[in-house]
Amino acid sequence: MPAVDTYAKVVVDDSGFRSEIPVLLTEKGVVQPLLDYLLNKQTERGQHWQRHVVSAAKMLLEYMEVNQHNFSDPVTLFQSFAARLFTGTIGDDGLDPSGLYWIPSSTAMANRHLNALKGLTDYLADHQGVQHMNPLVKASSYDQRLNYAAWYRRNQNDFLGHIKDKTVNETVRTARNVRGRRALSKADDDAVAFPEQLFERFFLEGLGGAQDRRCAVRDQLITILMHGAGVRESEPLHLWVQDVLIDPHDPTKVIVRIYHPEEGKAPDGWRSRTGKTNRSAYLREVHALAPRNRLRGTHNVGWKGRQHDHQRDHYIQMHWFPVDFGRLFRKLWREHLHYLSSIERHHPYAFVSYEKRTLGRPYTLNAFNKNYVAALARLGLSAAKVEGRSPHGHRHAYGRRLTRAGVDPVMRKKALHHSSLESQAVYTAPGIADVSQSLEQASGRLDELSTEGRIIQPFSNWDELVNTGFEDIDPRGLLSGPHAKLGRR
């Protein structure tokens, strides 16, 4: 019987809390060592990480099941398992005697599986008394250089690095027996930014073209936060109604603060019976809910940011750019509150569903993405991340807008809520179109310098080179050109 991954509610004490975590089931029941490992790491790692460990462990168990008689020791088995992640298990004849029929994984995904299993194999060796599948070994000189580079990078960007031991740790001289492959180098993506020339039409006709005006206003507000304040697509779904305030310096604008879903301070000076003031306690005591980043499935809304503008209340404050986005948000927010007041809610979240079967429930990320695609379709366009037409493309557009306006890098870091200046590089890097335009302008300057005799061009007469070609052989266009008369015969 193959292993099956599912969720289980785990009781570990006599409290009313039940841990709901992913587990693996086999014909012998729950894989207990994996469950113990996940419970051991539960307080420090999220559900996304747990799911990935379970997924990688499932693949390892499946491989062990069909190859249990082929290896004499765990180390050799794990080496072969790692190799099959990269190569797949299907032979050149299209057959796979093991029955796994794995296709080759990308380098990034295979490395991700191996990294997920590092902690598990360490835990099994330390707590279960089994031989380590992927032990640490003496690193080669190449691996030591890579380890040192990683160590140096961590210390350079560590806020508290000045109080830590700066000596090179002994682990720099060790490496995993199975390390995976080195991933391809990544250049800064180009068209990840939502096209500025498309935004007005998308906002008014795409999002604004929804049949239900309530849905249109809700999705427009979320998109303003992404495009005009640079938030990630998940962050607006953590917004509570009380988190939007009139700007005391400019009543025509609003201040928007998005609080950490657990540690953020509860509104209106609320305090629990035991004196707690965070949002996790508020949700549990007032609404019997868990924070959205702790839910699973479509109800889960992630939280990535670690940088906060207020270290005690744990919130990030939106910075409108250009500032008129703040005025537009205020206008639509007032309309949104009018619609919201007529909906029965049992939660504090500002954005809700208007679908009949889910009326008043917190708006989900899946639903927003579906409506986002529908808005693009109203313009005759499809979602395309490589062309910037995706929710995250608005954050990139915000970052590039700041760069083009000459905003200081430190201010850009603050506006994007990054912990280091390096983090904003992907949001502010020039795109292919920017590079092409810059080189086009530089080509003009090059011609001027060549005419003045200050530099020498690769060719003296470009026009003569491009005026000769196949057109001289086929003047009637029988075989060449976009409408060749004989081209398809």
Image (tube, helix red, strand yellow):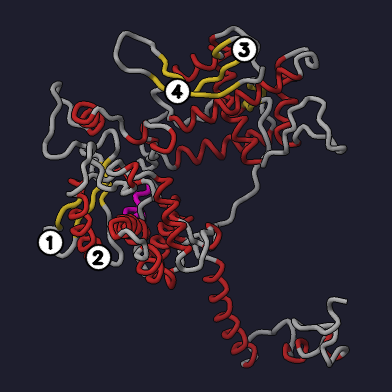
Q: Earlier in the sequence, mark 3 or mark 4?
A: 4
Distance from the alpha carbon under mark 4 to that under mark 1: 47 Å
- Amino acid type at circle 3 is Glu
Is residue 49 visible in the rendered image? The answer is yes
**Where 325 falls versus 76 (above or below)?**
below
Q: Which residues are magenta?
A: 413-418
Instruction: State the image coordinates of residue 392 (x, y, percent, origin top left).
Output: 44, 54
Instruction: State the image coordinates of residue 184 (x, y, percent, origin top left).
Output: 65, 48
Distance from the alpha carbon under mark 2 to that under mark 3: 59 Å
Q: What kind of element bears circle 1?
A: loop
> Which residue is labeled 3 in the image?
27
> Which residue is labeled 1 in the image?
249
Packing grade of label 1 (10 A; few <14, some 14-19, many >=20) is few
Q: Is residue 390 left or right of residue 306?
A: right
Tell whether label 4 touches label 3 (CB within 8 Å): no
Figure quadrant of the N terminus: top right
